[in-house]
Each structure stands twice: as structure tokens, then as C-alpha cells.
Image (cartoon, rainbow, N blue to C red):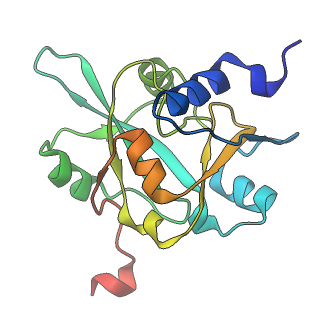
Amino acid sequence: MPTALEHPDVQRVLEAAARKGVTLEVIVFADSTHTATDAARALDAQLAQIVKSLVFVTAREDGELEPIVCLVSGADRVDLERLAAVIGRRDVRRATAREADELTGFSIGGIPPFGHVQRARVIMDPELGRFETVWAAAGLPTAVFPIAPGNLRMLADATVAPIAEVPVEQAS
């Protein structure tokens, strides 16, 4: 029985990083780190240091779905209007679990910021840049890796833009 580090999904993430000259240190937990809260607790990290890789979709000209992977702090949610403005499309919505799996090759809870089965546009919220190290999923709900936000941006080929919801107290 292969270990979690030998799992094809984790290997795909490690190989994607290696192609860009980065060696990742993947940490595997006995229990799921499926949610940002679970991951923060397991890592003894701040919730805001956990990278949520959320999959959204918009329709291409040919009617096929185009994946957009949003990287946001574990403490934040994606603002659909801000995301629509950043990508220049109004018809954006959250992907279903099945769509996310088919478009990235990973199950929700383990979706990494890169290494997807097809090219996806990746948008990274600048809030992640506040930290020296953030933690992202490594292909499984039990596997994560630490990374500097600048390296994360480079590996994911991400566009940095504000896509997180503005807290109500800041919006007024």
C-alpha cells in the first residue's frame, strides 16, 4: 500500500513544483485537514496562513467550463463581484464538487494551488502576502506544504488581485 507521499495526486504537486525548480516539503497528517480550520489547528498556525484553493467556473466561447482557481486566506471568502471584475466576466460561479474534481484532478479539501490536470487561471488574494509562510493543500485532504507567498505566486502562475470579501466594518 503506497504512503500518502507516494500518492499520485501528491506526486503531481511535487513534480509541478520541481519543474519550476522548487522542492516542496509535504507534511501528511493522520487526520484530515479538509477545512482551513482543521489545517490551522493541526499545524498550530493562524487560520489566515492557510491557503484555500477554491474553484470557480465561467463559460468559454465554445460553452466548455473554464476553471478559475482562487487562492485566499483561510479566514476569507471570495467576493464574486470582485472576482468577476478581475477576470472580466460576469458569468462566474462556484464550481460544484464534481466540476472541481474534473477540472483540477483533485478532490475538494485537497485541491492544491497548482499541478491541475488542465491549465487553470489562478487568482491570488494579496492578503496571503502578509505572511512569511503560508500552508497549502498538497493534493490530498491530509497533505499540506509550507511555502513563501512569492514562491506560491510563481508556482501557481497566479495573478495577484483583491478578490476576498471586505469585512462589513471596513466596507462602511
Residue 84 in the image: state x and y as whole percent.
Answer: 19, 49
Position of 128 compared to 165: left or right? right
Residue situated in front as seen by the camera: 27 or 141: 27
Report how many numbered discs are placed on residues in the image: 0
The C terminus is located in which quarter?
A: bottom left
In front of the other: 142 or 152: 152
Q: Is residue 134 visible?
A: yes
Image point 51% across, 23% down: which residue? 101
Q: Position of residue 11 (x, y in %)?
A: 65, 22
Q: Residue at x 73, y 46 (%)?
A: 33
Residue 18 image-quadrant placement:
top right
- Quadrant containing the N terminus is top right
Left or right position of 5 against 8 = right
Residue in view at x 84 percent, y 15 percent = 2
Seen from the viewer's position, the closer of residues 33 and 23 is 23
Is any part of residue 107 visible from this angle?
A: no
Determine which quarter of the picture holds residue 142: top right
146 relative position to 6: left or right? left
Q: Position of residue 62 (x, y in %)?
A: 13, 14
Residue that appears at 18% across and 38% down? 91
- In front here: 106 or 149? 149
Image-quadrant location for residue 15? top right
Which percent across, then down, holds residue 161? 27, 59
Q: Compared to 138, does 74 lie above or below?
A: below
Q: Of all residues shown, which one is farthest toward the front? A: 21
In this rendering, position of residue 108 left or right of residue 83: right
User: Can you say whether 32 is above or below 153 in the image?
Assistant: above
